[in-house]
Structure formats: C-alpha cells, structure tokens
Image (cartoon, grey):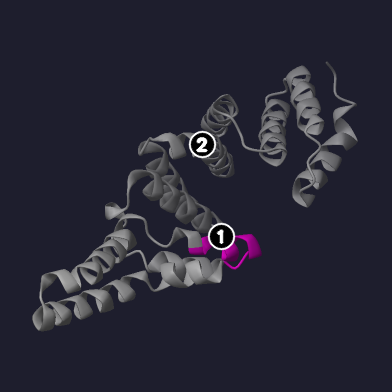
Amino acid sequence: MKWLNFLIKYRLWLGIVALALAIYTHMQAGFWPSFILYLIGVIAIVGHFLIGPLRLLQEPMENGDMEAAKKVLKTIWFPGLLIKPVRSQYYTIKGNLAMVDQDYEGAEALMKKSLSLGGSMTKQAEGPNKLQLGMLCIQKGDMKQGESYIRQAIRAGLPDSENNAAAYLQLCSIMMNKREFRAAKDYFRKAKSYKPTTPQIVDQIKQIEKYITRMPG
C-alpha cells in the first residue's frame, strides 16, 4: 500500500498545505466552501503528532535497515504527544535500536519506559520487553535480576517459538552457572520443544547439547 505510506510520510506537510488552501478559500468564498479543507488539514496535522509514522518502520525493520528506521524515528519531534499505545511502541523500537548499537544502558531505560505506559498494546509487548531486559541484565553480569525478568517474561507470555526458546535457553544457562543441573536440563528440553529456526538459537542449542547430557542430575 504505497499510497498509504506516502500519505503517512508527508501527512504533516499535506496538512499544512490543506490549511493554507482552506484559509485562502475562506477569504475568497467564505467558511463553508473551505470547511472540508480545514477538516483535512486538522486531521492530517493532529494525526501526525498523535499517531506518528511508525507504520513506515515495518519495511526497514524487516529488512534490517537500522539507519532507515532511525530516520523515521527522527521525524517524531514530540514523542510525549503520541497516544499511549503508540508511545509505548516508539520506546520499544528505540530500545531495540539502542541494543543494536550496544547502548545497553539506554536500551534498558527505553524498555522500562515502554513498560511503564501500560495499556493493551503494551500488555502484548510486556513479555518480549521483559525478555530483552533480562538479556540486558545478563550481559551486564546481573544474573539475579536477569533471571527475574526472564521468568516474568514467560509468565506474561511470549509471541512465538523463537522468543520462548530464547527465554528457556537463557534460564538453562543461568541454572548451569548455578550448578542446578536438573533444572538446566528441564529448561533445555523446553527450549528444544519449541523447535526454533533462528540460526543463532539453533547454534546455541547445538553448543549446549554437546555437554549437557554429561551433567549429573
């Protein structure tokens, strides 16, 4: 739907043009002939600030074009004006981009900000966000907080097999470090049961499988 993406991309400027035409028409022919132009202009401008252009992020995120995604986010000048569900999504995406840049402190702050907003859409993102936070804590060496976040992520619900497998593999690794080998084996079996296809997760399973069967328990 290229026409829709075009409208979203240039919605603010189209709204400004519509308002300018409305004012001109109002001066020449009165209010009612200009009414529809006023309406279009106001809807376009308000929509830009309340809903934003997040739909335009779908293609660059799917293609792994992080620079293009950052350019889209930069067009959101006042994120505080976005409605709550959209604002939550905005902070989640910014957090993911911060992780790509290895800005783990910034990513953690953004993920927490997303979760703090609440709402139905935020509820759907709660599991993935907490999984990300758990992995960030583990990368920083805070295993206890990382484990807590990952358990919360599983309870909140994760959207697909890849996320579930990743969560249980992280718990497996944590249990191995704590020398709780029986629990580690249980979490490893759960991770495998989701049959993930992401190369990184598949490789991690292969690496753990080499020595987990030799563990006691």
**Is 61 in the magenta?**
yes
Write down the residue under mark 1. Answer: 58
Label number found at residue 124 = 2
Please tell me which residue lies in front, 209 or 214.
209
* In the depicted structure, whether residue 129 falls above or below residue 60: above
Element at label 2? helix
**Is 19 in the magenta?**
no
Q: Position of residue 104 (x, y in %)?
A: 50, 51
Q: Position of residue 47 (x, y in %)?
A: 32, 59
54 lies left or right of 14: right
Question: Residue flagged by tag 2: what amino acid is it?
Answer: Gln
Please tell me which residue lies in front, 142 or 44.
44
Q: Main secondary structure of the magenta part?
A: helix
197 lies left or right of 126: right
Number of marks drawn: 2
Question: Residue flagged by tag 1: what amino acid is it?
Answer: Gln
Looking at the rendering, the stretch of residues picked out in magenta corresponds to 56-65
- At a point 47% along the width and 49% down the height, the residue shown is 92
* In the depicted structure, whether residue 113 falls above or below residue 150: below
Q: Quadrant of the C terminus?
A: top right
Neighbours of disc 2 within 10 Å: few (<14), some (14-19), many (20+):
some
Marks 1 and 2 sit apart, C-alpha to C-alpha, by: 17 Å
Please tell me which residue lies in front, 116 or 134.
116
Give the quarter of the image for residue 23.
bottom left
Q: Quadrant of the N terminus?
A: bottom right
